[in-house]
């Protein structure tokens, strides 16, 4: 028999801790360029990308699982901070693993294991669901940058070649249709 009150206490502790994700500032600006987005906004937005762009997912992708992954994927940034894709990522993996242990450990054991398994699957980027989720995570920021005049690309002196080498394959691997749509827009921006 489960300890319902104890489980609820642990779930609420996790949810209150998750609220701190709203305070983690990312390197990507909003579409209007007015400010940087926070990690909670990013997680919501990329989950909405999954829901909206589901018809462009490769066959066999479960959008419900993708959305769950995307809602959890950046929670570790509460402890580890956001790591801009064109920034220095040394030490980030160890920090994120420790954060995952702590944050998911707040939950009741069965839920902690379930959430952690989804997060680990996203990080491994091997299943069709994880590949599509990871591709969407890489697809959302360039679309914000295109909308706001370059955003973090300007901040990090990103060139088209840099973008195509670091980001293009990650989008194309799990969302080839989205990469085919984005690629000419990237070329036009950097022209």
Image (cartoon, rainbow, N blue to C red):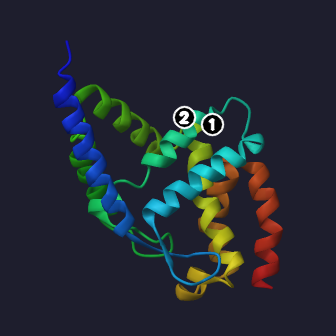
Residue 91, image x, y percentages? 29, 65
Q: Quadrant of the N terminus?
A: top left
Tell me if label 2 and label 1 are in contact, CB under 8 Å.
yes
Q: Is residue 55 left or right of residue 15?
A: right
Q: Is residue 47 left or right of residue 8?
A: right
Q: Is residue 120 left or right of residue 145?
A: left
Extreme-top residue of the structure: 1
Q: Quadrant of the C terminus?
A: bottom right
Rendered image: mark on residue 65: 2
User: Which residue is identified by label 1?
Assistant: 63
Could you say whether the residue bearing mark 1 is in a helix, strand or loop?
helix
Tell me which residue sits at (37%, 69%) in the image: 24
* Residue 17 in the image: above or below residue 4: below
Residue 59, image x, y percentages? 74, 32
From this viewpoint, is residue 158 visible? Answer: no
Measure how far apart labels 2 and 1 are at the Cα level: 5 Å
């Amino acid at each position: 028999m489960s300890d319902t009150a104890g489980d609820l206490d642990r779930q609420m502790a996790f949810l209150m801790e998750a609220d701190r994700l709203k305070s983690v500032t990312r390197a990507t600006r909003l579409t209007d360029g007015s400010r940087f987005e926070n990690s909670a906004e990013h997680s919501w937005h990329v989950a909405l990308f999954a829901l909206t762009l589901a018809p462009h997912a490769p066959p066999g992708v479960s959008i419900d699982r993708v959305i769950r992954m995307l809602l959890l994927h950046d929670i570790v940034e509460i402890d580890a901070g956001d790591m801009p894709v064109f920034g220095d990522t040394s030490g980030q993996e160890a920090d994120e693993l420790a954060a995952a242990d702590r944050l998911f450990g707040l939950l009741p054991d069965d839920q902690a294991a379930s959430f952690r398994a989804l997060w680990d699957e996203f990080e491994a980027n091997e299943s069709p669901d994880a590949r599509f989720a990871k591709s969407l995570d890489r697809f959302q920021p360039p679309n914000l940058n295109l909308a706001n005049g370059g955003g973090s690309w300007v901040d990090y002196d990103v060139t088209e070649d840099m973008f195509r080498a670091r980001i293009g394959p990650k989008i194309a691997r799990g969302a080839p249709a989205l990469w085919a749509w984005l690629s000419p827009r990237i070329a036009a921006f950097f022209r």
